[in-house]
Image (cartoon, rainbow, N blue to C red):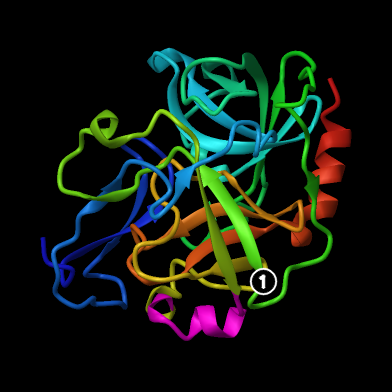
Amino acid sequence: MSLRNFFLLGFVLCGAAFAAEISKSDDRQGPEEEMGDAAGRVVGGTNAPNGAFPYHVSIQRITRDNFPICGGAIIADRWILTAAHCFEGISANELSILAGTNHKKSGGRRYKIDKIVRHEKFTTKPHVNDIALLRTKGNIKFTEKVKAIEVATEDPKPGDKCKLSGWGYTTQYKNSNIYRYSPNLLQWLEVKIISEKDCKSTYLQSYEKNFPITANHICTLNKDGDGFCQCDGGGTLECNNKSSGIISWNIPCAKGHPDVYTRTSKYSTWIQKNMEANKP
């Protein structure tokens, strides 16, 4: 399909609703190329060492045989930090998280969700305030493989190296068979922070109408073949052992364009306020 007529910008959610549509009625008219989506794991990543990301959880849909839809990060014994775009048309009683395992659907311990708190100003067009909290029905039991990560209040600098992790797709594909390509083991990748100016000056600036890059975002860019993809959404960008970003969107996937995250330092007050307001 020609990009002159249709383009997919990925909200990096698994399943049918994983992309935002930008049609020919929008300002951007892309170059001609055939667009595949992506499959398998973090693109360019490797198997994560056992227990290396003890905060990382798989968010799964109980009503669809525990199908993984997004990632998230434990930030307290009842709270998961993730992306708002993961929960369009989904209620809390449909969800659970799997914690304490590098395996996508086995091992670890499962916790049901009893509340979704999406940012009250989250919108898809423009795509802003992509942040949410999940509250578990019971306290998460912390172990060597299950730990909370601190939310950053200071930002990494351009050039700093950070880590992302997830069970998202790994390579470009041209069919919709997710499980054919999806890895069982958690993947991770070291990525480099770029400035807001550099993020804006790239190809992404062409999509500013619906996907603006603001001070509330943080961007990474390595090289063609490295980055996050569908099913990685909601996962954490770990910088200096803290959560500095939430995986939000990109041009699928790892095509040499920046990956865009919600900048957690800009929402630290929102996070604390909503955890307090929604105590069980």
| x and y percentages locating residue 207 in the rendered image | 39, 73
Q: Reply above or below: 130 against 220.
A: above
At 40% from the left and 50% from the top, the residue drawn is 229
Label 1 belongs to which residue? 160
| x and y percentages locating residue 144 in the rendered image | 76, 26
Mark 1 secondary-structure assignment: loop
Q: Reply above or below: 154 against 105.
A: below
Asked which quadrant contains residue 98, the reply is top right
At 76% from the left and 51% from the top, the residue drawn is 241
Q: Nearer the viewer, residue 213 or 122?
A: 213
* Direction from residue 185 to residue 112 in the image, left or right: right
Q: Main secondary structure of the magenta part?
A: helix
Q: Amino acid at mark 1?
A: Asp
Q: Reply above or below: 88 against 11.
A: above
At 32% from the left and 67% from the top, the residue drawn is 255
How many residues crowd around disc 1 within 10 Å: few (fewer than 14), some, or many (20 or more)?
A: few
Q: Is residue 124 visible?
A: no
Residue furthest left as drawn? 1
**Which quadrant does the C terminus fall into?**
top right
Task: Please report the bounds of the magenta region as a residue range.
Answer: 194-204
Q: Nearer the viewer, residue 188 or 214?
A: 188
- The answer to whether residue 197 is magenta is yes
**Which quadrant does the N terminus fall into?**
bottom left
| x and y percentages locating residue 269 in the rendered image | 85, 53
| x and y percentages locating residue 133 in the rendered image | 69, 37
- The answer to whether residue 150 is magenta is no
Asked which quadrant contains residue 78, the reply is top right
* Direction from residue 77 to residue 34 in the image, left or right: left
